[in-house]
Image (cartoon, grey):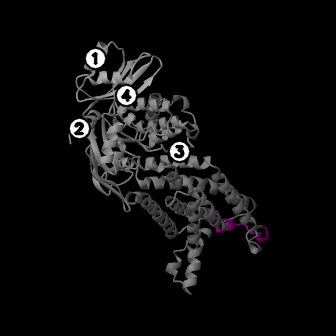
Amino acid sequence: MTSAAMIQVRDLVKTYGDKKALNGVSFDARAGEILGLLGPNGAGKSTTMKILTTFLSATSGTVTVDGIDAAANPLAVRAMLGYLPESTPLYSDMVVYDYLLWCGEMRGLARSDVIKRMAEVARVVGLESVIGQVIGTLSKGYKQRVGLAQAMLHNPKILILDEPTSGLDPNQIIEIRNLIRALGQNHTLILSSHNLTEVRQICDRVVIIHQGAVVADGTLDELEGRVASRHHLIVGIQTTATHDNDALKHMLAETPGAKSVAFSHSSQAPVPAAFFEVEADTDIRTALFERIRAAGLTLLELRRKSLDLEGIFQSLTQNA
Amino acid sequence: MKPVWILARREMAATFDSPIAYIAGAVFLIATGLLFFFGLGGTDDFFAAREATVRPLFEYAPWVLAVILPAVTMRLLAEEKRQGTLELLVTLPVTDTQIVLGKLLGAMGFLVVALAMTLVLPALVMSIGHPDVGAILGGYVGLLLIGTTFLALGVMASTWTQNQIVAFIVGMMLCMFFWTATDALLRLVLDQPPPALALLSFQSQFADFARGVVDLRNVLYFLSVTAIAVLASTYSLRSRHWQ
């Protein structure tokens, strides 16, 4: 409830017939942050976004955007928003240039301003090479860029992107993610995703929605801290022809602070190695390193196994 | 009202980009042309009648318009719904009413072009005789009005479904119903329908235009029906909020 909250969502309830899609969703998006709406398919992310963008009305609850009640003054709110709906609906029979020009004019921009702004946006999202093409002939990745371009054309305060990378190939995903991160520097941005890696890479803060309710709201570090109290490490040790995995495991287990050690796997390339998972209550990386060196062994790899969002997500959504 | 015009411009371009406009246009011109010259047989025959009048055009054209105009409007909102583009359209800073009016105005572009192409008929009649020019103008005003009303009914049907074929059939049935059935139905129920009720029929409202008389009451009638259809379309778009 800080004064910097650009978007305030309070107690949103949305019912479709008998089905409750949202059951009291509340969260804030602060000015200038990238907020991830995370949840399994059907959790209510898209419904929340459709209400935020005034496409749908909530059964009850309020959305306030920059101090303006979205239900009472939808046009003022829409003017502040850029929106990319799920699966990027576009007029496939239009040329990219004409489409963007049309979007800009529909938003009340003067033609000359749209053309100027379009050149800038096309450069940012990488549309310059296809600006004269018919949208229907573009690849999914380029269509996504057109969708992003129309959302940011009028330089809105807020961007709302519903599953912006779904259906893209890995290279396109990386490009679009980079683009979104860059956009997040001058916009308040809300994106939805069921992809945890994506949220980790892009978002400052995460709201996890499950079965129409918020089950977690915080930075990734906070959420990880809630679920992961233990340090979970992956240790890789170079092995010889005569090595004994049990002996190595035993040796690691003697490290002060280590609670449990489990053999994970071995590999041969590029050098023969054995991998173990070590759990501890505190950060024992230094101690582990010293221990391995004292044993005359070569440490190949030492990293924290991120009790990743997958883990957080599962524990939050399964208990909820 | 600027967004209405910007939307209408896009719709006009989209209409003339699609083969539907050309098929509908061709059907309209061929059908009205044949009916104008040969009628439905007998005394309607232009060559047999030997009279310099354009009146048969105004008598037959609404029948053809009632069939082809719903084919032009069927796409307008049904396609937006099917493709999901409606979500982007209605979250632009424009009102639902502006969207409906823009769609209607865009479809009127087709109507104006189609009617303009029939001007060859009065030109022909004027070249061989002396028809009443006032009557011709009145008739065209009437066609423009009844055509706009048909378009508004078609747009309304298009807001009800995401299937263009359904939108077409429902639109055509609405147009045909208002054009033909109101009179017939009234006669079916009442032996002598009161004149006030008979006024509700498109045919009786259009009859004066076909005679070349532009009566303000008839003009207001068609504008009112158009306004009701626009309101109903707006309501239908808005119904997404409480579904």
- Alpha carbon separation for disc pair 2 and 4: 49 Å
In this rendered view, identify the residue nearer to me: A150 or A213: A213
Q: Quadrant of residue B114?
A: bottom right
Please determine whether, in this image, residue B212 is positioned above or below residue A220: below
The residue located at (54%, 83%) in the rendering is B193
The residue under label 1 is A291
The residue located at (63%, 60%) in the rendering is B68
- Camera-nearest label, 3 or 4: 4
* Secondary element at tag 4: strand
Q: Quadrant of residue A262?
A: top left
The residue under label 2 is A4
- Camera-nearest label, 3 or 1: 1
| Mark carried by residue A60 | none
In this rendered view, identify the residue nearer to me: A175 or B194: A175
The amino acid beneath tag 4 is Phe
| Mark carried by residue A91 | 3
Q: Are discs 2 and 3 both within one chain?
A: yes
Q: Write the start and end of the magenta stretch as one range.
A: B47-59
The amino acid beneath tag 3 is Tyr
Q: Are marks 2 and 3 in contact (CB under 8 Å)?
A: no
* Secondary element at tag 3: loop
Q: Earlier in the sequence, mark 4 or mark 1?
A: 4
Local packing at callout 1 (Cα closer than 10 Å; few below 14, some 14-19, many 20+) is some
* Spot occupied by residue A76 in the image (x, y as percentages of width and height): 33, 46
* Secondary element at tag 2: loop
